[in-house]
Amino acid sequence: MKSNGTIVAAVCFAALAAFFTYQWWFNPTRAVQRRLNDIAAALSIPDPEPPVARVTRAAQLRKYLAPDIRVRMGASEIASRDQIVGAVSSFAAPPGGWNVQFVDVQIRVNHETGEDADAYMTVEMNGRDAQTGQPTVDAREASVTLKKIDGEWVVATAETKNTLEK
Amino acid sequence: MNRAVLVRSVILIVGAYIVFGYVLLPIRLQGISMEPTYTDGGIDFANRLAYAWREPQRGDAVAIRMAGPSVVYIKRIVGLPGERIEIVMGVVSVNGEPLVEPNVARKSPWNLAPVTLGAGEYFVIGDNRAMRIEDHDFGRTTRDRIIGKMLF
């Protein structure tokens, strides 16, 4: 009886451990969330940022973008990974740095293929006004599609959306 | 004695969780688009039950969600479903009639071509019309995005 109880407890523990391991490491939704967090970190600019750190950050960002990525912001569209990385790495952050966060992220993975996903979120950008030094915040809704290339989730398309339509 | 404290603490925690999770959404105000009514850095709450039994009204200051409730716009409703909204030299007109806006202190000469709202659409603007129109987010939103009425 006692040994049966021990076995049941061990099986329950193993099942729980397997569940949490799956949730943390292998669940595709969590993998996409982790990748989005990586991208937000790569888009954030610390202050001060040494030139070497800037190059490293741009290289990291490049890894997270598909070669044929398309980014649409309003009427303008960029369809070149090099152009995006170049624009991000040359962006002059305001004094105090620039912090990007993805909040209210809703992720949907295509479970049939397991190779593509889309995410809908609010992109929040915090910085400081260059003149007054006061904190500033800007936010935009964004839709992102991701696909798996060589086992890594990369951004295939990104588009910002206006919450209020004129 | 200790048990009473524990019970009170649990009731307080559960009550706060329900009130601030489902009824009153705490909001830290950032930006100047609703000045002078709401100033940058203030704290307010959006009452999520305000529109449980009635629809949003003209003049209501409301919280409008983006992708979710973590980041919201605070704006004032000027247009209701089916109405035609137009702005000429800073004056908002509803179905051709100039709107009286007691919360707006100064008006820049904004212009906006007539917009007819569809079913379930509301037109919202901030109170700070002294801003440049290009710097001010305003326009149409839908009923499902309005998550509550500002409490204060």
Image (spheres, rainbow, N blue to C red):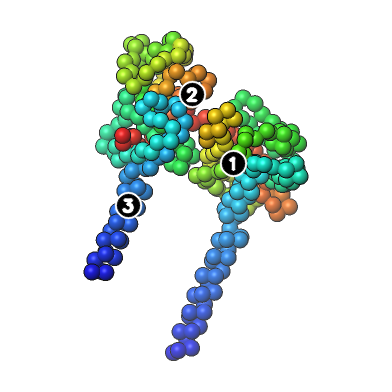
Placement of A51 over or under B58, stated as above or below: below
Mark 2 is on which residue type?
A: His
Q: CA distance from mark 3 to mark 2?
A: 35 Å
Cα distance, mark 1 to mark 2? Answer: 22 Å
Give the x, y percent position of residue A127: 57, 36
* Residue drawn at the location 37% of the way across and 13% of the way down: B93
**Residue under pointer 1:** A99
Quarter in which the C terminus of chain B is drawn: top left
Same chain? Circles 3 and 2:
yes
Residue B143 image point, x, y percent: 38, 32
- Residue indicated by mark 2: B136
- In the image: residue A57, left or right of residue B68: right
Tell me the subunit letter for badge 1.
Answer: A
Q: Which is nearer the eye, A151 or A166?
A: A166
Tag 3's secondary structure?
A: helix
Q: Residue at coordinates 61% horizontally, 47% vertically from top-left?
A: A36
Residue B139 visible in rendering: yes
Q: Along the polypeptide, which appears first: circle 3 or circle 2?
A: 3
Q: Residue at x 57, y 53 (%)?
A: A29
Residue A141, can we see it?
no
* Relative side of A60 to B149, left or right: right
The part of the image, by quadrant, that contains residue B53 is top left
Label 3 lies in what chain?
A: B
Q: Chain of mark 2?
A: B
Disc 3 versus disc 1: distance between alpha carbons? 30 Å
